[in-house]
Amino acid sequence: MKGTKGIMKKGIFITLEGPDGSGKSTQIQLLSEYLTKKGYDIVLTREPGGTAISEEIRKVILNPELKEMTDMTELLLYASARAQLVGEVIKPALEQGKAVISDRFIDSSAVYQGIGRGLGIETVYEVNSYALQGLMPDITFLLDLDAEEGIKRKKKQAELDRMEQQDVEFHQKVAEGYREIAKRNPERIIRMDGTLPREVICDMIREKVEEQLNK
């Protein structure tokens, strides 16, 4: 996006996080439409995925038949997919002044592998320090939702993948983990009630994005 004098504006990196079934996809679409109207070129991506290589890694990670996958293998696969996404898509887009909106990013690994799998948040960030290349989201929206409600929603949508098939206790750890990292990063992570009407959540997200853009 260029300003009125032709000067390239700084790109913005926005991520949406939350337990499975929290409504991220809907809010991403609404936010994309909003920023497009404001004149931004939009790059939508997801984790794991977002590039040809990362999408292939995604197939391995989420394959429900690969039940023997170790927790550390899972963490490293996510980091590998993320490294490719950052280098191939996110950093170049931000350098071009685009708005990047990602369905999940590093915070998902912090809670799913760090807390859910018990590997530790610090371990996750240490491993991912190479994948991130110094990049972090400008703002992250956490759609908070109880684990049971999230899984109930997902079961209505489609067949569950390997991560979604984890037991309720795992998903409860994930939901609580998100609340924990939100407390640790109040300047970046905006926690929202995922049970609110989507229009209400949409308005709240737009308001916070406007504040970020005006900084």
Image (tube, rainbow, N blue to C red):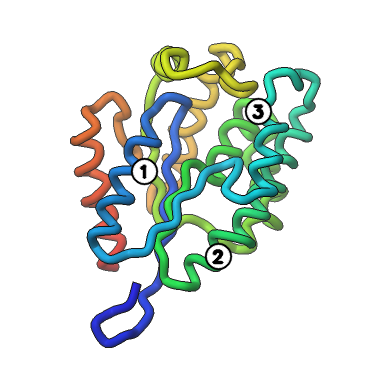
Q: Is residue 87 above or below residue 123?
A: below
Residue 3 visible here = yes
Looking at numbered disc 2 in the image, what kind of residue is underneath it? Answer: Lys
Q: Residue at x 30, y 30 (%)?
A: 193
Neighbourhood count class around disc 1 (C-alpha, 10 Å): few under 14, some 14–19, many 20 upward: many
Q: Which residue is mark 2?
A: 91
Q: Secondary structure at mark 1?
A: helix
Cβ atoms under marks 1 and 2 closer than 8 Å: no
| Sooner in the amino-acid sequence: mark 3 or mark 1 | 1
How many numbered marks are there?
3
Quadrant of the image occupied by residue 114: top right
The quarter in which the N terminus is drawn is: bottom left
Q: Which residue is mark 1?
A: 28
Quadrant of the image occupied by residue 161: top right
Q: Position of residue 21 (x, y in %)?
A: 42, 24
Looking at numbered disc 1 in the image, what kind of residue is underneath it? Answer: Ile
Q: Secondary structure at mark 3?
A: helix
Q: Is residue 43 above or below residue 185?
A: below
Q: Secondary structure at mark 2?
A: helix
Q: Of residues 184 and 130, which is closer to you in this image?
A: 130
For the residues labelled 1 and 2, the Cα–Cα distance comes to 19 Å
| Sooner in the amino-acid sequence: mark 2 or mark 3 | 3
Q: Is residue 150 above or below residue 191?
A: above
Q: Residue at x 36, y 43 (%)?
A: 28
Mark drawn on residue 62:
3
The quarter in which the C terminus is drawn is: bottom left
Image check: 84 left or right of 135?
Answer: right
Quadrant of the image occupied by residue 131: bottom right
